[in-house]
Every structure is written in C-alpha cells, then in structure tokens.
Image (cartoon, rainbow, N blue to C red):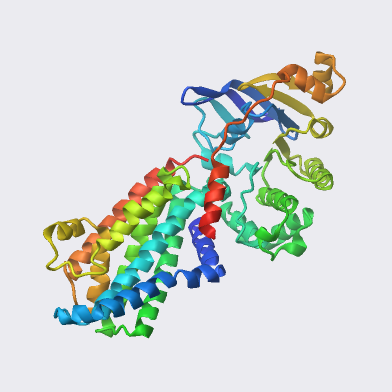
Amino acid sequence: MSAVYILWKRELIRYFRSRARLVGSLGQPLLFLVALGFGLGPIFQRAGQGNYFQFLGPGVVCMGILFTGVFAGIQVIWDRQFGFLKETLVAPISRFEIMLGKTLGGATVAFIQGFFVLLLTMIIGFRVQNIFLIPLALIAMFLIALFFTALGITIASILEDMQGFQLIMNFVVQPVFFLSGALFPLTGVISFLSIIAYFNPLAYGVDAVRGSLTGITHFGLAMDFTVLVIISSILLAIGSYLFSKVEG
Amino acid sequence: MDDIIQAINLTKTFGNFTAVNNVSFDVPKGEIFAFLGPNGAGKTTTIKMLTTLLRPTAGTIKLNGIDTITNPEKARKTFGIVFQDPSLDDELTAMENMEFHAVLYKVPHKELKERIEKFLSFVELWDRRNDLVKTFSGGMKRRLEIARGLLHKPEILFLDEPTQGLDPQTRNKIWEYLQNLNKETQITVFFTIHYMEEAQAVAQRIAIMDHGKIIETGTAVKLMEQTQTKSLEKAFLKLTGTAIRDEETSGVDKLRAHARRWRG
C-alpha cells in the first residue's frame, strides 16, 4: 500500500507546486459565476425560480471537479509520452496499485479544487442553507472527483496519444457538464433533456451537492448517493481492467 | 544458473510486422554486454521484453532464474533500467524522484536516506538533490536515472543508449561509474548503443542484431577477426550492410508539440 501512498503524494506535490495552474483553473468557474450568476439572475428571479446564484453555485463547484478530475486522469497519457509512466510500469508493484494511487491522487486534487471553488462562491455571495449538511456535500464532491478521475484514466488507457483529447473534451466532458442540470433546473425542461440527464453521472453529482447545500433536489439525495457510489465502483473496476492491459 | 539473463526463442510481432524473430541469448552474471544494431533492428523491443514492458508473442525470459512472464513482479526487483528517453518526473526534485523510486521498490525505510545519499553522490548530484529535475541538463538527467536505477541494488542494469546525445566528458564519466560499479558489485550490465568505440572499450561481449535476428555474438576481437576488419565499426558495417535504416516514427514528437501547446 506504500506504493499507492507515494503515487497519491506525487499528484499532490505536483498540484500544489504549480500555483499558476491552481489559480488559473479558478478563472473559468469565476467567469461562470459572474457572467451567468449575475447576468441571468434577474430573469431567473422574474420567472419565479428564486435566487439563481444559489442555484448555480453548486453547479459551478461540480464543474471545477469535473474538469480537474478528467484532466488529472488523462495526464496518464502525458506520463506515458514523457516517459515517467515506464518508471512505474517496471516497478515491482501491480497495475491495480498504480491505478488506485493515481485515481486517489487525481481525485484528491479535483476535490481540493472543488473545495476552492466552493470557497470562491461563498466569497461572492453563495449561502449554505444547513451547515450540518456540509459534510454530505463534501462526500458527494469526493465521489464526483473519484468518478471523473477514473473516467480520465480509463480514457487514457484507450487513447494512444493526445490527438483524441479535443474529441473527448468536446464530445464527452462538455456535454456531460452542460446537460447535467448544473446551469438550469431539470424540472420542467423538455423531456428529451430530462431523459438525457437520467443517464448523466454528473446530474446526480450536481443534484447531491446542491441538495446538501441548498435543500433543492431533483432526484432526491438517497437516489443521488446510491447512483454515485455504484457508478464510481463500476468505473474503477473498468479502469483497472483497461489499465492492466497498458503496455510500455 | 550462471547465466543471469536467459532469452529463449523470443519473438515479438506487431500486426504482421515481426520486430524480433526467434532470438535466443544468454548473459553470464557480472558481464558487461553490448547489444548493437542499426535503427529498427529490434533492440529496444528486445529490451522492453526483457524488462517486462512488452509481453513476447512467443518465447521465454529468465532473469536470475525468475520467469518474467509468469512472475513479472518478482522479476522486476532483479533489475534497474535506464531508458532511451528520460523517465524522470520533471516537476519533482532529484530527491523526490529518488524517494518515489525507493518506495515503489520497497527499499527499507532505515536505509533509504543513506542509500539515496550514496548513489546521488556516486553520480555527483548530491549537491543538486533539492533542485527540480526540469532545471537539469541532459547529462545530469541521465546520471540521475543511473543513480535511481541502482537504488534498489539490482543484479542487472539495463541501459538503452545511455550515452546518446551527451558530450564526451559525460559519456566518459558514465562509463567510469558503470565499470567501477561492475568491478565492486559484480552487477551485470546490458546496454544498447550506436557508438562502436564505446562498445569496444567497455563491453566484454557484443551481440549484433539486425532485422529482428541476432547475427553475431562474441568479443570485439572475435568479431573483427571474423570479418577481417580493423575496427568494430567496420565489422559492424560488414555484418549489417551500409544501407540507411529508417526508424518508424513513434508519434512522440507530434505529441510533445501538442502537449507544449496545452501547457501554455
């Protein structure tokens, strides 16, 4: 298990060492909060849906986790191309340990990033409804981080190089975000959008975080957490299997 | 059991291309063994199979008697490797790269500090231990990789073109380290190289590979006698021909350009 720990530690060292990246990746969530939060807020209010900023905040937190997580996982491709992956692949440890260490490391990084975005939303004006449910929100955030980091590693195990990266961003990550209900309520949208949301892992993540922090949920918290735990476990298993087939 | 590396009927095919074709060889313990061949001859594929990074299509490999295919994790403990391309983490310090390796190879915690100091001093990098690897020159990186490859006290050290692209001073220094180490610890050294003078000066035995097959094995003197040439370089050209080989593009260069764009 010490191998898992050192792989985890490496991800954290790298994350905290590149302050520019850390601060830079807060830029996009900030833009969403300011432009959409304040821009669409009055319309949302007029439509009788209450405070849009309160609605949007958890969605943007999840966005931060989604992008950081997938990116952390997909960095395995860079590790491979820049040679470092070989160092871990020839080491006397199992592929499962490598996969686990990298996933936990990436997920921790994505979780911390999400936590920073949460602080940012709170500075700008987001208010938590029930302080006692914050731990629940944090658990949901970590599960989202775990799922999407594992997804990134799974993708990285299949892709040979970064050529397909743009494809993944545009046809997987962005749709997952925009169709998750992070930006708009799933209640009352045309049925095709709400059906898609049923198959979108992030929809349950966003709903769990939003439900814990503001009390508004679409699927219900029990459903959210059940789905998150199940799909994270399944993806970890798939990722481990595919990663075990990776050759140097 | 005197042969620490045993390769028996090794074959590796990629699609319908045969990179390594039914190759067998043995390297006795304590030997410095050079593996020569033109670009695309199958050297790197062979090293990757020996070091468990690629699974052979057919054949058996035993390192120190351990079958690398049925027991890869145990086999991996027996060797250290210095790859052709750097395999360090640039964003970490020299020390952190060493610690990472030590933990992966389960170097006992008590010995960890002492061993890292010993091997970093050995390659004259102890003073730079807390510097990020990305600030290192090519030669320093290669020396760090050698120190790292030795950290878990392997019985075999594989090196894929260890002196490629380095200045004569560094090349000289690297061979000095390796020869001293070989004398002191009887470590077996297996390396590939394009510089014939270095192979001739350092290796006790040489194998020449071409088109996926080993065409000759022996001492430099024997190879020169056999081909009636005066230098290993001439012997090599006589055995492998003078036509230029084109290595297949790996896509790595394309990717590096891509990654640079992403990193900003």
Q: Residue at x 41, y 51 (%)?
A: A166
Residue B111 seen in this snapshot:
no
Residue B158 in the image, given as x and y percentages of width and height:
67, 39
Q: Taking A164 as reference, is A222 left or right?
A: left
Q: Taking B232 as reference, is A120 left or right?
A: left
Q: Quadrant of residue B157?
A: top right
On screen, A173 above or below A186? above
Q: Residue at x 78, y 33 (%)?
A: B195
- In the image shown, does B56 or B89 lie closer to the viewer? B89
Q: Residue at x 80, y 46 (%)?
A: B167
Residue A236 in the image, given as x and y percentages of width and height:
35, 53
Q: Taking B258 as reference, is B1 left or right?
A: right
On screen, A235 above or below B223? below
- In the image shown, does A170 or B231 lie closer to the viewer? A170
Residue B25 in the image, given as x and y percentages of width and height:
65, 24
Q: Taking B75 as reference, is B118 left or right?
A: right
Residue A246 in the image, given as x and y percentages of width and height:
46, 41
- In the image shown, does A131 or A159 lie closer to the viewer? A159
